Amino acid sequence: MASQASQASIAPQAESEQPLLSVQDLKICIQMDNGEMKAVDGVDFEIKKGKTLGLVGESGCGKSLTSRAIISINPKECETTGQIVYHSTSEKTLNNLNLLSLDPRGKQIRSIRGRKIAMIFQEPMTAFSPMYTIGNQIMESILIHRTKNKKEAKKIALEMLSKVGISDQEKRFDQYPHEFSGGMRQRAMISMALSCNPELLIADEPTTALDVTIQAQVLELMKGLQKEFGMAILLVTHDLGIIAEMCDEVAVMYLGKIVEQSTVDEIFYNPKHPYTKGLLKSMPKLGTDRNKRLDSIEGTVPMAINLPPMCGFYDRCTDRIEGVCNVQAVPKTQLSDNHMVRCFLYKDKNEGE
Ligand SMILES: Nc1ncnc2c1ncn2[C@@H]1O[C@H](COP(=O)(O)OP(=O)(O)OP(=O)(O)O)[C@@H](O)[C@H]1O
Ligand code: SF4
Ligand SMILES: [Mg+2]
């Protein structure tokens, strides 16, 4: 990856304006037998210090590829270009650094991955090896990134297990992943991710595999730890309920592009893009008849291979304008400082016009 990434250091910005992470024109292409798949196609977003950005969209729209690109863990067939600029708050040498310019197996990205930017996944077994105890694996990460002292590392690991609500930590420390329940493994993975006080936590569908009660507990836990440690979160999910619960800002993704982006209030109370509106309509609401079928957006997402320049949502959109939406690429429209939409319905509504 990082095949055409540009220079490591970017022109400086005033400290106060700097987001923690700025993703600019991120593109991820994969060569397939029937052509080039533009799985991520010009994505831009910023993650502010201590805040939560939600990345939402249907399956296959490019959420995981985008989030994994940040720490360079996509497989090598994923050709990645653009810039992912990191502004570390705690380390000057990691300020203004284009992460895509780093060798994905090199020392510098390894010193960021896990220590400064941690990631948790839907399936905790991807994070833990079945061969070692949970305690050993959490300790290992602390020994790599935080301290060389084993006693101190064990103390931190036990504290973290306790913080995520795992009782009887001494006993649990020596157990193997298969001896933990699903919810407990998820908690243990969070404790491992947070044991190095990361500045950014990337959480890719962190609760999808859990039942609803445990899901709520894990989300609460993440919010609590965010408050305590001041970290930023990139929360990847297809669940708008979780977005409403957790996020400050939201980026709605469709077919490799961000089609709408704004604050959580704007997205929920003043959505503009027909796709966002469709997603909101398909959300279960409190008090609705449980037997009533939910509205879902009709049609399926096309494959991002050899697509003509047109709106990718055209075939599913009830507001489509023939001769406009199907003949050209859709530009971004900035409706206000913090509301962007990519749809021809708003083409002439740029801020200030
Ligand atoms: N290594 C790969 N080789 C080929 N295609 C891939 C690869 N990784 C991802 N893709 C494809 O790229 C597209 C985006 O994948 P991605 O995993 O980012 O989707 P997602 O939005 O995270 O979906 P989900 O909600 O199902 O997790 C999908 O069509 C997927 O099949
Ligand atoms: S650009 Fe056209 S087809 Fe696409 S979402 Fe907007 S109205 Fe619908
Ligand atoms: Mg995914």
Image (cartoon, rainbow, N blue to C red):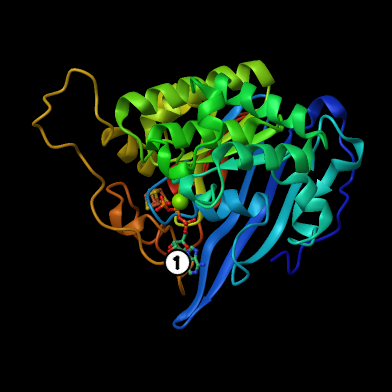
> Which part of the image, by quadrant, shows the C terminus?
top right
Residue marked by disc 1: 304
Between 178 and 257, the one lying in front of the other is 178
State the image quarter where residue 102 is shown: bottom right
Residue 73 vertical placement versus 54 (above, below): below
Residue 333 vertical placement versus 162 (above, below): below
Residue 131 in percent (x, y) is at 53, 52
Between 326 and 94, the one lying in front of the other is 94
> Which part of the image, by quadrant, shows the N terminus?
bottom right
State the image quarter where residue 34 is shown: bottom left
Q: Residue at x 48, y 24 (%)?
A: 246
Residue 58 in percent (x, y) is at 37, 49
Q: The disc labelled 1 sits on which kind of residue?
A: Ala
Name the residue at the bottom extreme. Answer: 33
Residue 65 in percent (x, y) is at 55, 56
The answer to whether residue 4 is left or right of residue 50 is: right
Between 61 and 172, the one lying in front of the other is 172
Residue 353 showing in the rendered view: no
Which secondary structure, mark 1? loop
Residue 126 showing in the rendered view: yes
Mark 1 Cβ and ligand 1 under 8 Å apart: yes
Residue 255 vertical placement versus 244 (above, below): below
Q: Residue at x 40, y 62 (%)?
A: 326
Q: Residue at x 59, y 72 (%)?
A: 77
Residue 181 in percent (x, y) is at 38, 35
Q: Residue at x 52, y 33 (%)?
A: 188
For the residue carrying disc 1, how many other residues have a C-alpha within 10 Å: few (<14), some (14-19), or many (20+)? many
Between 300 and 332, the one lying in front of the other is 300
